Image (tube, rainbow, N blue to C red):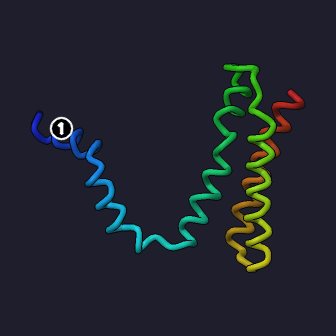
Amino acid sequence: MNTEKITKGIRDLFDLNLWVQTVKEHAPRISAETMGWIAVILLHLATIPTMIAILTGLTEKMPPVDLVLFSWAGLFCFFLKAAIQKDFLNIVTIGLGFFVQAAMLALIVFK
């Protein structure tokens, strides 16, 4: 095992200048469309861990209502944007996410 490589990797992980340099190099290639996809995925994933924990019985505590409402409102806005732009792929992706979220919520409520 090469400890020098591990040490350099750990040092690079916490090197802020390296992070800034990497972002500057790769940011121009990231499009607005990519950021939109990342936002949709993150919004979908916001309540999944809590819902899975509730379904498996690890906790009885539901996620805060405001978190769920704002997440769904954000997704609905993305859905409307996709519908206006006639972006079929985003419409399907967001619609599928709504379906999965609603199914998980129904499993919790009607358990």
Residue 58 image-quadrant placement:
top right
21 or 44: nearer the viewer: 21
84 or 15: nearer the viewer: 15
Residue 8, position as x, y percentages in the image: 16, 42
- In the orientation shown, which residue stands out farthest toward the bottom? 85
Residue 37, position as x, y percentages in the image: 59, 63
Q: Which residue is drawn at 26% across and 54% down?
A: 18
37 vs 76, left or right, is: left
Residue 4 image-quadrant placement:
top left
Rendered view: 2 above or below 18: above
Residue 111, position as x, y percentages in the image: 86, 27
- Which image quarter holds the N terminus? top left
Rendered view: 19 above or below 55: below
Rendered view: 53 above or below 94: above
Number of numbered discs present? 1
Q: Residue at x 82, y 45 (%)?
A: 102
Rendered view: 62 above or below 84: above
Callout 1 secondary element: helix
53 vs 15, left or right, is: right
Residue 105, position as x, y percentages in the image: 81, 38
48 or 24: nearer the viewer: 24
What residue type is disc 1 on?
A: Ile
Q: Name the residue under label 1.
A: 6
Residue 50 image-quadrant placement:
top right
